[in-house]
Image: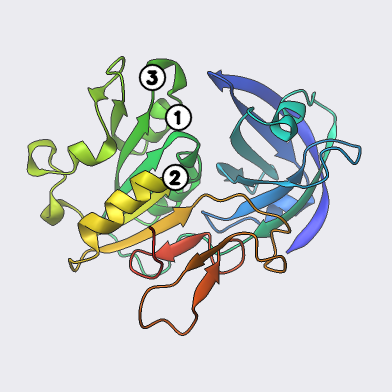
């Protein structure tokens, strides 16, 4: 974990109330683990007081740039959305434990499942997996067509399925509706699952696969205070048989093995 300032290169809307910010600086050179996050000070003053946890979407180590995609919803992220090129952002990170990829093998098939602002960390993950010779298929879910982003970039890595609740783009319904043989995404079609998104989606995936032998990893989204495991604001209960009674999402996670935590 390090702390420093990164310079804003661009900060543009990519969907309804969703922005993509590109930052540059030496701190980026530490960010080589997909699935980690940054604790971002959204404004120059003391308001808002707390930093905001935002996942790393993409990293270019050669140019020392990184992208984050965030929804301008609360006061902090709305201030962040007003940051202009040349401004400096106070960053703490990279933080947390990312998606484990070191044991992946060439020729394997990884299924990436994301929902809403849980989709961004899957881009850097997908790029790293493809570079290792792993086949990647993405299933990404949104509320409406106006909320869809990263479809084209994920499509450069492999096949992409889009779902929307209202059916205005892609398949109508939830991402879990596509996880069957009809779409070539039955249990035998892939080797490992990586997912990030809203709690109900992750809970549905855990319920579906925890009783099987499928390998899977879930990245939990949660409000955080300190971001480093000191304040206990982002704990979740551990599964039966674990050495701990609870896990800190910020420091033990945000990525957990499919069966390691209790989502209830």
What distance separates the C-alpha of mark 3 from that of mark 2? 20 Å
State which tag comes first along the sequence, 1 or 3: 3
Is residue 51 at all visible to an observer of this figure?
Answer: yes
**Above or below, 80 relative to 26:** above
State which tag comes first along the sequence, 3 or 2: 2
Q: Residue at x 67, y 50 (%)?
A: 38
Q: Are marks 3 and 2 in contact (CB under 8 Å)?
A: no
Q: Position of residue 63 (x, y in %)?
A: 69, 42
Q: Which residue is mark 2?
A: 122
Which image quarter holds the C terminus? bottom left
Q: Residues within 10 Å of mark 3 (few under 14, many from 20)?
A: some
Q: Which residue is mark 1?
A: 150
Disc number lying in front (1 or 3): 3
Q: Position of residue 195 (x, y in %)?
A: 38, 50
Query: Which disc, if any, is residue 192?
Result: none
Disc number lying in front (3 or 2): 3
Q: Position of residue 58 (x, y in %)?
A: 56, 42
Q: Position of residue 135 (x, y in %)?
A: 28, 49
What distance separates the C-alpha of mark 1 from that of mark 3? 14 Å
> Looking at this view, is 127 or 160 the one in front?
160
Q: Is residue 104 left or right of residue 93?
A: left
Q: Residue at x 39, y 59 (%)?
A: 263
**Above or below, 162 relative to 31:** above
Q: Is residue 56 left or right of residue 127?
A: right
Which colour assignment does the render follow?
rainbow
Q: Is residue 220 left or right of residue 109?
A: right
Q: Quadrant of residue 194?
A: bottom left
Which image quarter holds the N terminus? bottom right
């Amino acid at each position: 974990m390090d702390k420093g300032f990164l310079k804003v290169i661009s900060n543009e809307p990519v969907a309804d109330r969703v922005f993509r910010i590109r930052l540059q600086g030496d701190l980026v050179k530490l960010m080589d683990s997909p699935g980690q996050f940054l604790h971002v000070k959204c404004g120059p003053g003391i308001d808002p007081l707390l930093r905001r946890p935002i996942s790393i979407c993409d990293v270019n180590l050669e140019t020392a740039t990184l992208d984050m995609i965030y929804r301008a919803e609360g006061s902090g992220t709305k201030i962040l959305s007003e940051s202009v090129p040349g401004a400096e952002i106070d960053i703490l990170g990279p933080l947390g434990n990312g998606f484990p990829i070191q044991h992946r093998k060439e020729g394997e098939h990884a299924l990436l499942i994301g929902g809403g602002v849980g989709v961004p960390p899957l881009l850097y993950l997908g790029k790293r997996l493809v570079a290792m010779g792993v086949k990647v298929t993405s299933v990404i879910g949104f509320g409406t067509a106006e909320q869809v982003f990263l479809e084209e970039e994920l499509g450069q890595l492999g096949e992409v399925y889009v779902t929307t609740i209202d059916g205005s783009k892609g398949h109508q319904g939830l991402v879990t509706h596509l996880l069957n043989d009809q779409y070539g995404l039955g249990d035998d079609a892939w080797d490992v699952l990586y997912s990030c998104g809203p709690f109900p989606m992750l809970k549905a995936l855990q319920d579906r696969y925890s009783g099987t032998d499928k390998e899977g990893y879930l990245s939990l989204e949660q409000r955080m205070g300190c971001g480093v495991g000191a304040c206990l604001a982002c704990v979740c209960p551990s599964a039966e048989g674990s050495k701990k009674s609870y896990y800190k999402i910020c420091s033990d996670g945000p990525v957990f093995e499919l069966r390691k935590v209790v989502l209830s």
